[in-house]
Amino acid sequence: MIAPFELVRAGSLAEALELLESDPEAHVLAGGTALVLLMKQGLLRPSRLIDIGGLAELRGIRMNGDLRIGALTTHLEAERSALVRRHCPALASCFGTVATVRIRAQGTVGGNLAHADPAQDPPPMLVALGAVAVLESGAGRREVPMEDLFVDVFETSIGPGELLREIVVPPLAEGARATYVKFLPRTEDDYATVSVGAVLRVDAGGRCADVRVALGSVGPTPVRARRVESALRGERVTPARLREAAMLVREEVDPIADARGSAAYKREMAGVWTERALRALLP
Amino acid sequence: MKLDHSARIDAPVERVWAIVSDVPRAGRLVPGVGPVEPLGADRYRGTLRVQIGPVRLDLAGDIEVTSRDETARTAALRLDAADHRLGGAVRATMRLALTQATPSTTDIRIETDAQVLGRIGELGEPIIRRKADRIVSELIANLAREASS
């Protein structure tokens, strides 16, 4: 049962920010897919919810060289958006793998990031793409690289009084390719055992000009696979080299044991799925 | 849920023991602990605030030193605390052992066995374990700072 609370509908972004500032204990309601579950479980008993669902400023997908996705965009809208598909097909398909279609139609891109569940799909993909979160408060606006947004399980660097306004995804460099893969050994709508977002650019000579790899579900936050990246950058990318580099990820992840497998198993799978992701990106 | 922490502290064992055997003083080194009041007979009352993402736990309860060996420099504590607003409780035993590594350094070991009951448990053991682990690690780091200053 949900404990009684006051629901305040913010009519504008400015009003939402004022409400947030005046009541730091209030929680923000967007799609509600995570928040309402926590309230039903009795883990959250907010006295006040600020409903930001009506804020036009946080809606919509735009292009101005970068792709800008408003925080209130649902996963379904992002998945089906022609702009997102053109800008980065892998990102569109990543949004299309979040949970189930009912949740995708309700949950928002911004809410998902602010919830900071380490098993979610968009965070590792957005980290690999070098995306940036735009945060807004009464004091102004600041931009946080996606990998610095996540601090711990369910914890972000979004400060008191701040709202996630939009995310900015820079274009892929010429010749770069991106992918998102996840390992679902149980059911299609389960959390991933491990997931990998990767971007790879191979030059005309067959060398790795740039690479970014980030993993989900294998640490308290998305894990940027820097050792894998530096083992590849500047090197000729052969299947053998990819495999060798991918296996380095096992030393970078910090998985927990749960119903999806032991920590050791997930560590191995992180290597296997990093290799698969990178291999899919070879020209 | 069992946790086992060991560390070496840059301070003589006598000084580290003096801090940890003073429960209200040691309590100040635990992140999130409010004032610890003595109840007599080596029992104390205190509060612990833990934030896990959007979820805040306000635990209030008692600490009892169940054994204390000044010569071996070991002690055992029992903690029993509840969050009445959310509905849940934490019961834990902690065993603490200090050994002299060198005349100016001390090895500390803290073994914790905690049970998380009620609604708090819905957060899941892995998340609770990570948080508990961090609290004990910070306690040891704060203790090392205080003992060596």
Image (cartoon, coloured by chain):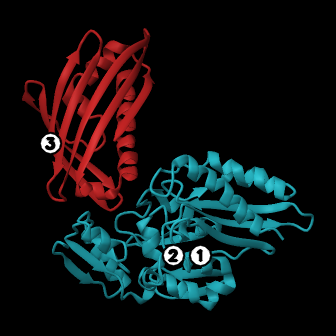
Give residue B92's position: percent from left, percent from top. Answer: 24, 38
Label 1: state its secondary structure: helix
Q: Residue at x 35, y 27 (%)?
A: B146
Task: Specify the quadrant that holds the N terminus of chain A.
Answer: bottom left
| Residue A253 place in picture, x, y as percent | 58, 50
Q: Are marks 3 and 1 on the same chain?
A: no
Residue at 27% over, 24% down = B20
Parent chain of label 3 = B
Name the kind of residue labelled 2 in the image.
Answer: Val
Which residue type does callout 1 highlight? Cys
Quadrant in the picture for the C terminus of chain A: bottom right
Q: Which mark is residue B61?
A: 3
Kindly identify the residue that appears in the image at 21 percent across and 52 percent down.
B58
- Mark 2: few/some/many CA within 10 Å (<14, 14-19, 20+): many
Q: Residue sitting at 74 percent across and 63 percent down?
A: A278
The front one of A103 and B98 is: A103
Residue A52 marker: none
Identify the image quadrant of residue A272: bottom right
> Which chain is indicated by disc 1?
A
